[in-house]
Amino acid sequence: MDDYGATQALHKSLPPFSPYVSATLLPHIALVLLVSTFALAFYFSTLPKDKIPVRETAVASLASVLGGFGVVALFCSAGVNV
């Protein structure tokens, strides 16, 4: 029982959670990331085909990463905290 009481006291003494990124900035961050994803996807579709697709892979990977973070920011701004 002492462990539970100590845990409760520790829990009450901790500061409340505060996110690194303000919730009011999330829609703007999501917009920037998703617009840049669509711009990179358009750029990817206009690239010439190379024998070794280094540039294509880099553009597609960057678009994928930006799209993933953009969707997470969009979900968090809508209240679905993931």
Image (spheres, grey):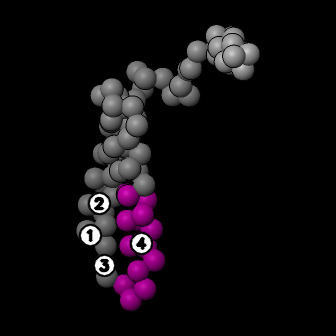
Residues marked 4 and 2 touching at CB (< 8 Å)? no
Check whether the beta carbons of the residues at disc 1 and disc 3 lie within 8 A of each other. no
Name the secondary structure under disc 3. Answer: loop
Q: Counting other residues with Cα less than 10 Å from the Cα at mark 1, is it few (<14), some (14-19), or many (20 or more)? A: few
Please tell me which residue is depicted at 58% across the width and 15% down the height of the picture. Answer: 16
Q: Residue at x 40, y 21 (%)?
A: 24
Residue 41's tag is: 2
Segment colored magenta: 50-64
Residue named by callout 3:
48
Place residue 62 in its image quadrant: bottom left
Indicate whether 32 appears above or below 27.
Answer: below
Q: Secondary structure at mark 4?
A: helix
Magenta span: predominant SS is helix
Amino acid type of disc 3?
Pro
Q: Residue 20 is drawn in which quadrant? A: top right
- Residue 19 is situated, as x and y percent measured from the top left of the image, at 53, 25
Amino acid of disc 2? Ala
- Based on the displayed image, in which of its 4 quarters is residue 56 positioned? bottom left
Can residue 20 be seen here? The reply is: yes
**Label pair 1/2, CB-CB below 8 angstroms:** no
Q: Is residue 35 left or right of residue 12?
A: left
What's the CA distance linking mark 1 and mark 2?
9 Å
Q: Is residue 59 magenta?
A: yes
